[in-house]
Image: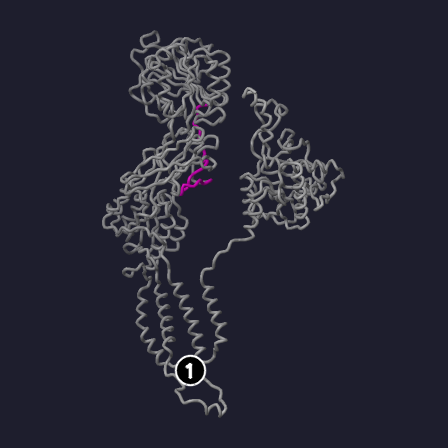
Amino acid sequence: MIAGLPLAFATPVLLSALVLLPAIWWLLKLTPPRPRLESFPPTRILAEIAPKEEQPARSPWWLTALRLLLAALVILALAGPVWRPAGESAAGDGTLLLVVDNDWAAARDWPARIETAKRIVDIADRAGRPIVLAASADPANQDLAPADAATIRTRLDALAPRPYAANRAALAAALAPLGASKAIGGADWLASGLGGPDADAFTAFLNDRLAVPVTLYAGTPSPLLGIADPRSTAEALTLAVLRPAGDGTATGSLVAEDLKGRPVGTAPFAFKPGETRTEAAFDLPTELRNDIVRVEIAGSGTAGAVQLLDDRFQRRRVGLIGGGSIDTAQPLLSPLYYLSRALQPFADVLDTRDANAEIAVPKMIEGGAAVIALADIGTLTPDVERKLTDWVDKGGTLLRFAGPRLAAATPGQNTLIPVRLREGGRVLGGSLSWSTPQPLASFSAESPFAGLAVPNDVTVSRQVLAEPDGNLAGRTWAALADGTPLVTAAPMGKGWIVLFHVTADTSWSNLPLSGTFVEMLRRIVAFSSPPADGAARTAGSSGSVVSLPPYRLLDGFGRFTANDPFARPLPANAQGTVPDREHPPGLYGSDEAFRAVNVLAPDATLVPLDTAALRGASVRAYPTAAPQDLAPVLLVAALACLILDALAVLWLNGGLRLRRATPAALLAAALILAAGPRPLHADEASDRFALEAANQTRLAYVTTGNSEIDETSRAGLAGLSRELAARTALEPGDPMGVDVEKDELAFFPLLYWPIDPASPMPSSATLSKIDAYMKQGGSILFDTRDELDRPPGGSGFVGTPAAERLRDMLSGLDIPPLEPVPSNHVLTKAFYLLGDFPGRYSGGPLWVEALPPDETAASAADRPVRPGDGVSSILITENDLAGAWATDADGRYLYPTVPTDPRQREMAVRTGVNIVMYALTGNYKADQVHVPALLERLGQ
């Protein structure tokens, strides 16, 4: 490093060659150029020449200076000059231990960390030192044997940050044999910046067990931030933003997204000097807040800066209905008062204050209640019981509390209870009595209460008793010390019925006064789901524990990844899961119901690394900018000097005249410019294609390379476009041909693809591109055009070259099950009412995605349309639709139909109109059948 300049040399000893420059100057000075040859002139001209010195005795000064500059540039280039050197070093001697923190906190500036590690490896390689590479987040899955530099560079290229915390204590245990054998001569530790007990244990290992020179790299330009402690209150969704050090102020924002990655809202945050924790709140309507699945710090790029939310953080609506008249007279003694106060922190309470259950229950169901709580309601009218039964069957959770009315009801009067009850109740001092109040003893491991601490101050003096039978044990979620159930539950349809065998007030127990009561209600509400969801619960119908498979997992950079071969399913009743290699952070379950596992726990703090605890270590910062090798620049400059020197010598020797020198100088300048970086130019053809496709709605066809087929496709879509403009509100532009390998497909909602058996098979990359296009909402209409070539009685895509080629193509795509368009499909009524879908030929079916049958309908005839809002991503025909649509510039059809029938031509055009309308509007027509019901509900 040169003092005052950010410049260093990899081989500074070569700079000593600069002392040779005076000798070179002396030699060049004494060496004259070669004498110039002149043709012998006539005598008359010789007589007119004035006497003068004919030959210089030394080289011109400027040529000597040019050659000295050339020599200096070569010497400087060979010395390995580096601008802004990072200053890395390989500590100690002998085998080098290179420890790289690859936890989530190391994801920020990860490329800079890896480049730093590679430069350290280069230094060790030049010294001939073997290297041991140890990643702190993979203590049990790595090779800790010394290796050469090439092997270490390969492992560094494959290394990636993990989405969980480092396990440096386990790494210290794995490195203990190397420390005991004194095989390590020095260590370089590339730290992530996080400290804590884990880092303290590794520091102690380096200080006491290894006892070698250590270089510690810590601190990067990017701040370390994390998110923890999401809390959903009635006012807002609040999250805590963390940082390890409280120096100075800092601001930023959180971004909330739904399951599909669409932004829902933003929330700013700001740290004051000295603060390591602040909060940000999303003040959004409940409906929008319930859509939030992912919250991240904008621009952070680490898994710890992401907080995933599941249904536990959604604001459920809970309806409360009480059965006692005391609700109005003394509200503070009402069971509904205790329930309302316990539920308000995490749920929206629907309290109609209507004693008539016939009115209150329908209002709550229409209000979207996920849970309806009945406090001491014994007998339900048949109409209310029927409505509640239907609501629970669809996924609702009915939460019941005991009381005098429920205890007095005869067993036959109550069907909406999870277990059979004995008539009467168990009272302290009664015939079925305890001598002392019974404490709460246990929670079932197969219930939502699993992992909840059993309080030692909750007692029960009265309860309703369950009749013992073979199902009672499996339906008990909480039990008293004598084994009798306190909470029982049973599934019914897609929903659940839960019964507290005590009252919701303090008349039978002090449970409503405890924090356990609030937590029990919180878990029941989180366990519930709105009836429309039908989401899976955390316990199976038989009480068995459900395992949730990995659904969407986070990588170290906080991005969703589709697959992790080491991830294992998560028990659904697991509470407080700490992320590790087998259970990385992410979503477990399915898109209908999932459980979120996050990097940072609600009570997490970010503890900075204590660099002072590492005795005698050299502490360095990661470079803020990458070092730049100046050798290539100097060598290019030396080459330019060499070319100029050659031109100068030619000029001095008379071999180069001015008019000849101009082309040579231009050639030299061109060579110098060619050695520099070349500017990048935009792909004008690609830009033009994008502008044409985006500025106007167009139909598109896939080009096959066969000019006849491509021209038919173009003419067919052009004819269909004219028909669409004449018959519908859509006025498409001229159709466009698409090369599926090169062109962007996202501009087009529908692609027409004629199958040419002679065309080459699409590559794997092209098939992946097509698959992504179809999964992101695009539709492809495949046309084999081989109806007349099909063998008699044949079905499916077999028997012809085009059909076989289509089968080969579809085998490489993720295609759902297909079926011929049923009579109740939206395609039959998207614009025209159609019974079949002919083209140039008729008889072949139009295949679309098979939709599941409507389970609520008695038969297909009972439903006018198929359910669902999506559009089939694939349509297949063999009827040559483009051939039927193809027209010339004057609108005359180019190809006859088979058989020649004007009606078939008209139906083919209607088929094209319906397909385009279906691709653009989806199941819009399917919604029209609901208009009478909607108008009836609106009172019109």
Instruction: Give residue 824's position: percent from left, percent from top.
Output: 63, 28
Relative to 799, residue 359 above or below: above
In the displayed structure image, the side of residue 831 where residue 341 appears, left or right: left
Relative to 118, residue 673 above or below: below
Mark 1: few/some/many CA within 10 Å (<14, 14-19, 20+): few
In the displayed structure image, the side of residue 162 where residue 276 appears, left or right: left
**Can residue 920 be seen from the camera position used here?**
yes
Find the magenta span and give its range.
Answer: 542-562
Residue 193 in magenta? no
Q: Using the rendered view, name the quadrant where residue 60 is placed.
A: bottom left
Nearest the eye: 18 or 196: 18
Instruction: Give residue 304's position: percent from left, percent from top.
Output: 37, 39
Residue behind mark 1: 34
Q: Give, as a three-letter code, the residue at label 1.
A: Arg
Instruction: Give residue 626's position: percent from left, percent from top.
Output: 36, 54
In the displayed structure image, the side of residue 659 where residue 213 appears, left or right: left
Quadrant position of the C terminus in the picture: top right
Relative to 454, residue 583 above or below: below
The residue furthest right is 900
Residue 558 in magenta? yes
Residue at horizontal 43 percent and vertical 21 percent from the top: 371
**Can residue 583 be seen from the camera position used here?**
no
Q: How is the protein colored in the picture?
A: one colour
Nearest the eye: 365 or 188: 365
Instruction: Give residue 801's position: percent from left, percent from top.
Output: 67, 45
Nearest the eye: 773 or 211: 773
Nearest the eye: 580 or 351: 351
The residue furthest top is 431
Badge 1 element: loop
Quadrant position of the N terminus in the picture: bottom left
Q: Using the rendered view, name the quadrant where residue 528 is placed.
A: top left
